[in-house]
């Protein structure tokens, strides 16, 4: 039952419960204390009275002056009401523990034993008889109507003349007790009125991060992780740790998903690569034969003008096929020289007029100051492709940025433009051949070729497209 | 008690001061609980009344028991005393009869046996066997001696008949002791009980008169035998004359008495007989 209760209620309820229990325990303790204080006060005052009385009673007992003793014991009870209600009783026992006089003679007849009065006084009588000591004592039991203070009446020489019992009804200090109880109840109520809302609010605040966490966990897989990560609890406490752990988990999920997507894309690209290579090969073989045949026929045959025209047409078409297939089939060109600074500058020079045509600003940053052991043709091709793409994408009077640097044993080419963001769908098929949209104006093979070249150089290409612009970054490992 | 005494002394001093040069000795009058002598305002009023008429300071003297007052008279330290009849009868060598109060037209009174009002059955001492019993004073006729004599007539031994007896040293306190249940029976001056019935009916209503003794001579006012005759007769005239003036009648009303008369020793024959009875017993 309690386990099924939500923390939303559990924590505030627990706090409220603790506050209420604490308040009750504290006020209960205070009340009990007040009760005991009232009792102690009563006993103290009674003891004082009893000591005076016992001294006053001494001659009366010594001379067997019953009436004098009686007048002595009723003097402190001058209110007839008090005497009649029996709130306070004063009983004098003689030295044989028989009743001598009492403030209520009818209830305590002379020369009777206390046992004849009632059970409570009977027990009191047994205690008095059993106690030889000549010291005052207090007798009290739960269920008894009175608190008894017993004071021996001693002669001057210390001989016991009798015993004085002053019995005070609990009713006597009940008003004081009730007053204390009332006070405690009111202050408890006040404390609860103040603390309970605070406890409820505080509990709510404590439960909130947990609730958010629990809620977020149920949404994993259904809502974007970025949204889920936004309101996670922070801090060094356990909930904060949970939040941080959950955040890390979400982050890893994101990364894993991105990696999976990337793997999928590169597998697809590899498959396309294999396919295009196969097709190109299959096309190139007969194509070579056909071109050879046409060439031979044009050279050694004697075609008439019409045939010659047709042959030329066929030859041009076949050459265009070979060109296209050649572009698809990016083959490693081994004859490249090492990469020099001039290669980068060439690319810059080549692209500058196009940028100028669009009034775009080209920011160039080249931190390479020595030749690198990378094939220059491929790298030049890569950089040029990226720059041409960027120029195509940039808005008029836009901004182009190219930065070339060396980091961690790699060459890093980064080309950015502030053109339109590339849509998510397009990003997924970015490097596939003929995937480019018409507006770019390219042949649809630029990025595909770039990708193939980067793959051949065992590098990486990444595209990051934001509303503010798009950046392509190529990282190429340098063999040392 | 101390307060009353102070008031008395102050009154006496006032009395002295009112007299020229204060040369005259005060007349000292001992009182006992044969009447309600605990009413200080009444006593000071009575004292003023006497001082005006005797032209001498008057001092009332109270003691805890009849015996102490009796002893003071015997030692000539009191001029007059309102005592019970047994002390007078025993000390006639030192006392003379001055006056006897008149109650309900006669200089007589009775001893009452009273029981708590809740006791509907007791009609005499025999019914109180094994009970607690209150006397007023061993020198009192109504509060002790009359009861002894009555029990003797009934062949009851007073010393073993009751579970316990005690003295309250005042008739009024016997009534109180019986009223609160401290004693289940008590001997009390009938005059005092009747007077209390007028002044404090709530007290006497808690008691019931179970038996009344024969009539006895009222506790007398006596003088020391050595008193000078002029003072004696002046006091006698004053007491007997109280019923003849308004102020005196007012005081008598408070005393619940009709007046005073000279009285005679014959009035106390009954008491004398009780004394003899008791001595024989």
Image (cartoon, coloured by chain):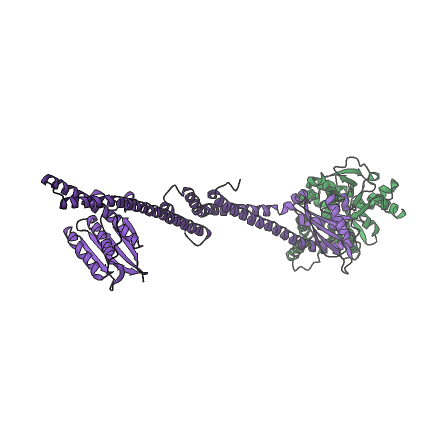
Horizontal and vertical percent position of residue A122: 75, 46
Query: What x and y, as percent, mark residue A258?
Result: 35, 48
Q: Residue furthest top?
A: B120
| Left or right relative to B176: residue A314 | left
User: In the picture, residue A476 is in which quadrant?
Assistant: bottom left
Chain painted green: B
Residue B201 lies, in percent from the top left, at 69, 39
Q: In which quarter of the image is the C terminus of chain A?
A: bottom left
Quick one: which residue is furthest to the left in this view?
A305
The quarter of the displayed image where residue B190 is located: top right
Q: Which chain corresponds to the colour purple? A: A
Residue farthest to the bottom, as pictured? A370
Residue A220 placement, left or right of B93:
left
Front-lying residue, B86 or B225: B86
Callout count: 0
Asked if one can make out residue B49 in the rendered structure from this viewpoint, the answer is no
Residue B151, position in %: x, y?
85, 42
Residue lying at 36% horizontally and 44% vertically, measured from the top left = A224
Of residues A184 and A291, which is closer to you in this image? Answer: A291
Camera sees residue B133: yes
Which residue corresponds to the image point at 59% horizontal and 48% vertical from the top-left? Answer: A176
């Amino acid at each position: 039952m309690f386990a099924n209760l939500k923390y939303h209620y559990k924590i505030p309820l627990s706090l409220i419960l603790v506050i209420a229990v604490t308040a009750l325990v504290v006020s209960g303790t205070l009340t009990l204390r007040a009760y005991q204080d009232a009792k102690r006060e009563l006993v103290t005052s009674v003891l004082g009275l009893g000591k005076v009385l016992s001294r006053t009673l001494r001659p009366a007992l010594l001379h067997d002056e019953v009436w004098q003793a009686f007048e002595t014991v009723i003097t402190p009870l001058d209110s007839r009401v008090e005497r009649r209600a029996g709130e306070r009783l004063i009983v004098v026992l003689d030295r044989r523990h028989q009743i001598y006089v009492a403030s209520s003679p009818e209830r305590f007849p002379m020369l009777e034993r206390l046992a004849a009065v009632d059970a409570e006084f009977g027990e009191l009588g047994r205690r008095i008889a059993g106690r030889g000591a000549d010291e005052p004592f207090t007798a009290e039991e739960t269920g008894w109507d009175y608190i008894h203070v017993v004071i021996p009446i001693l002669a001057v020489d210390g001989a016991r003349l009798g015993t004085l019992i002053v019995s005070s009804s609990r009713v006597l200090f009940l008003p004081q007790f009730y007053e204390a109880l009332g006070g405690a109840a009111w202050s408890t109520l006040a404390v609860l009125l103040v603390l309970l809302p605070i406890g409820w609010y505080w509990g709510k605040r404590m439960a909130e991060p947990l609730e958010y966490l629990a809620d977020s966990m149920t949404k994993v897989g259904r809502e974007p992780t970025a949204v889920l990560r936004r309101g996670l609890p922070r801090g060094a406490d356990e909930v904060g740790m949970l939040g941080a752990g959950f955040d890390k988990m979400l982050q890893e999920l994101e990364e894993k998903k991105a990696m999976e997507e990337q793997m999928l894309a590169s597998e697809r690209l590899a498959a396309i690569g294999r396919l295009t290579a196969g097709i190109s090969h299959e096309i190139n073989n007969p194509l070579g034969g056909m071109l050879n045949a046409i060439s031979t026929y044009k050279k050694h045959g004697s075609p008439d003008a019409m045939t010659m025209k047709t042959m030329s047409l066929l030859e041009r078409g076949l050459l265009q096929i070979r060109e296209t297939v050649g572009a698809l089939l990016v083959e490693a060109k081994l004859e490249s020289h090492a990469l020099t600074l001039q290669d980068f500058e060439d690319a810059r020079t080549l692209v500058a007029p196009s940028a100028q045509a669009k009034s775009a600003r080209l920011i160039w940053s080249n931190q390479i100051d020595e030749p690198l052991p990378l094939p220059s043709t491929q790298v030049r091709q890569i950089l040029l492709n990226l720059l041409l793409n960027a120029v195509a994408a940039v808005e008029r009077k836009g901004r182009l940025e190219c930065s070339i640097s060396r980091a961690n044993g790699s060459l890093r080419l980064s080309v950015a433009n502030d053109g339109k963001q590339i849509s998510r769908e397009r990003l997924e098929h970015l490097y596939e051949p003929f995937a480019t949209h018409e507006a770019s104006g390219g042949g649809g093979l630029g990025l595909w070729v770039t990708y193939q070249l980067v793959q051949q150089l065992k590098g990486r290409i990444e595209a990051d497209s934001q509303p503010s612009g798009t950046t392509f970054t190529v990282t190429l490992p340098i063999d040392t | 008690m101390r307060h009353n005494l102070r008031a008395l002394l102050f009154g006496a001093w006032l009395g002295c001061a009112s007299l020229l040069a204060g040369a005259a000795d005060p007349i000292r009058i001992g009182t006992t609980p044969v009447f309600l002598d605990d009413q200080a305002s009444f006593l000071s009023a009575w004292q003023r009344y006497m001082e005006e008429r005797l032209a001498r300071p008057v001092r009332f003297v109270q003691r805890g028991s009849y015996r102490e007052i009796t002893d003071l008279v015997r030692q000539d330290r009191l001029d007059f005393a309102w005592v019970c009849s047994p002390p007078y009868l025993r000390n006639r060598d030192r006392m003379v009869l001055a006056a006897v109060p008149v109650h309900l037209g006669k200089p007589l009174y009775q001893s009452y046996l009273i029981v708590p009002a809740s006791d509907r059955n007791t009609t005499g001492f025999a019914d109180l066997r094994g009970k607690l019993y209150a006397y007023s004073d061993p020198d009192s006729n109504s509060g002790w001696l009359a009861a002894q004599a009555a029990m003797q007539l009934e062949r009851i031994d007073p010393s073993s008949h009751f579970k316990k007896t005690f003295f309250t040293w005042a008739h009024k306190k016997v009534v109180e002791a019986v009223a609160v249940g401290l004693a289940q029976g008590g001997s009390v001056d009938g005059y005092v009980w009747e007077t209390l019935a007028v002044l404090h009916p709530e007290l006497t209503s808690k008691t019931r008169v179970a038996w009344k003794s024969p009539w006895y001579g009222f506790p007398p006012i006596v003088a020391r035998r050595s008193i000078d005759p002029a003072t004696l007769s002046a006091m006698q005239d004053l007491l007997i004359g109280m019923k003849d003036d308004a102020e005196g009648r007012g005081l008598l009303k408070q005393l619940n008495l009709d007046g005073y008369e000279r009285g005679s020793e014959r009035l106390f024959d009954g008491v004398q007989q009780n004394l003899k009875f008791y001595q024989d017993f």
